[in-house]
Image: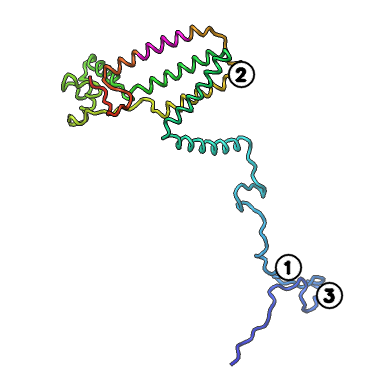
């Protein structure tokens, strides 16, 4: 039994299909008969589509969207900022190398000041800034003297003081505060020394300040005339007073801000 055959029909008729001749007069005269599929080309979906909204990122009205200068600067700043932060993260364990770089920058700045005889006020400002960073590096994050002052003020106002402050004579300050929220065991008397300014932040701030001071020696506009022996005497006096005060604080609360192979305790009188 043979398979049924179907007529070969063209789904895309020509503009003027062969057929009966249109009437010479009456409705439809003078117009060729057209099919509803006339004018449609085969494989019309395979042709390249035109660019329209939503066909690609950064397109507006068929044209690439142009970024202004502020957006370009912001994008580049973000990229370089990430690279710089990654470099800082990789340099964290290299303590000695980091401080040697800072020392080299400071020596270059000092040579500019000594050999070119200028920028004394910049040197003084840099020294004061590094001194403040160094004091914050030596001080504990939780100062026991502040807790003692708060407990004394509370007692003067008629309050009971800090929690646990009335348990014993030496249980004031931070110890009383800790005992008020603990079971009073001896194993909780240890308080590790946590710096107010961590070493990495100390190094980063000192390096940034030294770099700015070194760049300020490029121009004489930052060279303010000043009598440098007065600045030197004032700095030495300020350094002596602040370090004496810090040493007294260390002796009073019995802590050492440096790791000497022994865990540091502080706050216990």
Is tag 3's residue or tag 2's residue first in the polypeptide sequence? 3
Q: Quadrant of the C terminus?
A: top left
Is tag 3's residue or tag 1's residue first in the polypeptide sequence? 3
What residue is shown with label 2? 219
Task: Pick whichever, 30 or 119, lies toward us.
Answer: 119
Task: Pick whichever, 5 or 178, lies toward us.
Answer: 178
Contact, CB < 8 Å: mark 1 with mark 2? no
- The alpha-carbon separation of the residues under discs 3 and 1 comes to 25 Å
Q: Residues within 10 Å of mark 3 (few under 14, many from 20)?
A: few
Label of residue 39 in the image: 1
What residue is shown with label 3? 24
Residue 166 appears in the figure: yes
Task: Tell me what residue is drawn at x 18 percent, y 29 percent.
Answer: 186
Is tag 1's residue or tag 2's residue first in the polypeptide sequence? 1
- The alpha-carbon separation of the residues under discs 1 and 2 comes to 78 Å
Task: Tell me what residue is drawn at x 33 percent, y 25 percent.
Answer: 258
What is the span of residues highlighted in magenta in the rendered image?
A: 232-243
Residue 204 x/y as whole percent: 46, 28
Q: Secondary structure at mark 2?
A: loop
């Amino acid at each position: 039994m043979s398979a049924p055959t179907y007529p070969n029909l063209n789904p895309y008729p020509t503009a003027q299909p062969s057929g009966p001749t249109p009437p010479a007069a009456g409705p439809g005269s003078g117009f060729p008969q057209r099919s509803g599929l006339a004018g449609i080309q085969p494989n019309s979906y395979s042709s390249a589509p035109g660019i329209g909204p939503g066909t690609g990122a950064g397109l507006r009205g068929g044209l690439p969207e142009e970024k202004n200068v502020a957006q370009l600067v912001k994008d580049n700043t973000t990229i370089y900022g990430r690279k710089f932060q990654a470099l800082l993260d990789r340099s964290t364990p290299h303590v000695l190398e980091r401080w040697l770089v800072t020392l080299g920058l400071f020596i270059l700045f000092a040579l500019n000041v000594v050999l070119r005889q200028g920028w004394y006020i910049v040197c003084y400002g840099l020294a004061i800034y590094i001194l403040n960073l160094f004091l914050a590096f030596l001080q504990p994050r939780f100062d026991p003297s502040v807790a003692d002052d708060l407990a004394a003020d509370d007692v003067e106002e008629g309050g009971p003081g800090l929690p646990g402050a009335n348990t014993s004579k030496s249980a004031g300050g931070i110890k009383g505060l800790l005992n008020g929220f603990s079971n009073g065991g001896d194993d909780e008397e240890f308080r590790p020394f946590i710096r107010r300014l961590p070493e990495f932040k100390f190094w980063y701030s000192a390096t940034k300040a030294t770099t700015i001071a070194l760049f300020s020696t490029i121009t004489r506009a930052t060279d303010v005339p000043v009598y440098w022996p007065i600045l030197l005497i004032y700095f030495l006096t300020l350094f002596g007073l602040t370090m004496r005060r810090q040493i007294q604080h260390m002796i009073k609360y019995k802590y050492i801000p440096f790791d000497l192979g022994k865990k540091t305790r502080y706050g216990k009188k």
